[in-house]
Image: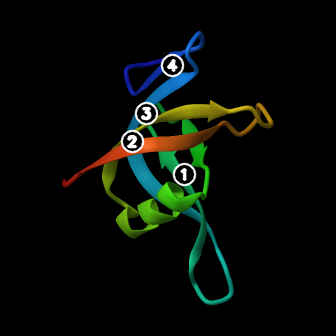
Amino acid sequence: MNKAVQYSKKENKLVIRGILVPEDWDSSSQITKMAICTSGEQEFLIEMDSLGKELSKYKGLKAVLNGKLKDTDLKRKTIIVDQYEIHQW
């Protein structure tokens, strides 16, 4: 993995640096799915728990997400966010 993504398999800890992007919306234009895209063109879905939903207000901004890799379909990796930092352009 590149500098934008750091992963400790032993501890299942993940740090991702990238841009927050919406992936899907509901019929009332509320974001229902978010992702973070790295400079290395990797994309991770964001688990839409309370922190994931909170991140939707920062769409389009740079962020550093700390969390755990969710054990799901390997085609689309998902991060469960424990904490985050938002960076202005």
The residue carrying mark 4 is 7
Above or below, 49 relative to 62? below
The C terminus - image quarter:
bottom left
The residue carrying mark 1 is 35
Label 1 or label 4, whichever comes before in sequence order:
4
Task: Give the number of the mark in front: 3 or 2.
Answer: 3
Disc 1 to disc 3, C-alpha distance: 11 Å
Task: Give the number of the mark in front: 2 or 4.
Answer: 4
The reply to whether dot 1 and dot 3 touch (C-beta < 8 Å) is: no
Type of amino acid under label 2? Gly
Viewer-closest of 78 and 76: 78
| Residue 70 image point, x, y percent | 67, 35
Type of amino acid under label 1? Ala
Label 1 or label 3, whichever comes before in sequence order:
3
The reply to whether dot 3 and dot 2 touch (C-beta < 8 Å) is: yes
The residue carrying mark 2 is 18
Above or below, 1 relative to 51? above
Say what secondary structure mark 3 lies in: strand
The reply to whether dot 4 and dot 3 touch (C-beta < 8 Å) is: no
| Residue 86 image point, x, y percent | 28, 51
Q: Is residue 10 left or right of residue 64?
A: right
Q: Residue at x 74, y 32 (%)?
A: 71
User: Callout 1 environment at 10 Å: few (<14), some (14 to 19), or many (20+)?
Assistant: many
Disc 4 to disc 3, C-alpha distance: 9 Å
Q: Residue at x 50, y 44 (%)?
A: 81
Q: Residue at x 56, y 32 (%)?
A: 68
The residue carrying mark 3 is 16
Type of amino acid under label 3? Ile
The reply to whether dot 1 and dot 4 touch (C-beta < 8 Å) is: no
Say what secondary structure mark 4 lies in: strand
